[in-house]
Amino acid sequence: METLILDREHGNDPGSDVPSIWVSVRELAIGASLTIRQRAWWLVGGGVVMLVMARGMRAWDHAAGEWLHAVNSGAWIGLARGLSWWGELHRAPMMLLVALGFAGVRIRKPALVHAALAGVLASVSAGLLANIIKWVVSRPRPSTSIPDGFYWFKMSWEFQGFPSGHAAHCFAIVGAVSVVTPRFGWLLGVGALSVAWSRFWLERHYVSDLWAGAVLGIVCGVVFGMAARRLAGWSRHVWNGDGRYTSRGSLGL
């Protein structure tokens, strides 16, 4: 049986199957930075493709908007508002991540804890990046009377259309958790798509805004998800109570 000596100097808790939260966060940040350095050109290329595709989808944006005006009788507005409200990062998305992390602690599956932490870091990162891009690009929201276009470096709410922050942080969670624990990915994906639909239905974003936000989120999620998988070694070891971790062979997820 393979054993690992517990390193008390690195903040590990002898009564737990997982290293401390802060150690895990630090390791995830280091792993994410390593992934970014190793895949920098891929990430830059993906960003360029995202912008080009979003630009090319603008014709679809206005066609989708006309269709929405034709079919939207107000019957689904209440549902859309509810999904949009709960889709804020500090509400349902963060609650789900806290529940996932707590479940990982309770059933002693550190990979769940790492997936939750990766989801938190990815969603916050995606949200920050989305807000920066919004400020730079300054595309009007479809609900305003401002002609579509890029107006550059405007801070007001009306010019925060591209990309969708809701789509960014929701799909960041989907990407991060799916890389570590794929069985939960489809459920989170349904939730993310529902939130994205609500933002379209409420005319807060064009389709291309949602597309760009989703791509940005997935990229952030995969980066932190890959970092979390580097911590999977913790999930293959159980605390013996005598200062050692003993191998149990697989993630069991």
Image: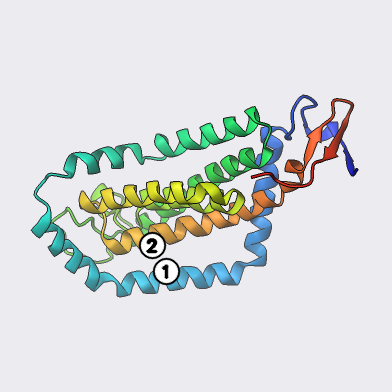
According to the image, label 2 marks what residue?
A: 212
| Res. 6 visible in picture | no
Q: Quadrant of residue 48?
A: bottom left
In-image side of 162 versus 183 (left or right): left
Q: Residue at x 58, y 54 (%)?
A: 179
> Which quadrant of the figure contains the N terminus?
top right
Mark number for residue 231? none
Percent from the top left, x then y, of residue 227?
66, 52
Q: With 28 as the anchor, is 64 left or right in this view?
A: left
The residue nearer to you, when weighing 193 against 134, is: 193
Q: Residues within 10 Å of mark 2 (few under 14, many from 20)?
A: many
Residue 70 higher or lower than 5, as above or below: below
Quadrant of the rendered image containing residue 67: bottom left
Q: Position of residue 97 (x, y in %)?
A: 51, 37
Q: In the displayed structure, does residue 120 sit left or right of residue 214? A: right
Amino acid found under the numbered disc labelled 2: Ala
Q: Secondary structure at mark 1?
A: helix
Give the quarter of the figure containing the C terminus: top right
Give 110 or 84, whichever is nearer the viewer.
110
- Residue at 59% across / 56% down in the picture? 223
Task: Give the colour scheme shown.
Answer: rainbow
Check disc 2 and report its element: helix, strand or loop. Answer: helix
- Could you tell me which residue is drawn at 62 percent across and 38 percent down? 113
Along the viewing direction, whichever of 110 and 49 lies nearer the viewer: 110
Instruction: Note whether residue 38 is visible.
Output: yes
Measured in 3D between alpha carbons, the distance from the residue under mark 2 to the one under mark 1, in whole angstroms, is 6 Å
The residue drawn where x is 31% and y is 75% is 56
Q: Mark 2–mark 1 contact, CB under 8 Å?
A: yes
* Residue that numbered label 1 is attached to: 50
* Sequence-earlier tag: 2 or 1: 1
| Number of marks in the rendered image | 2
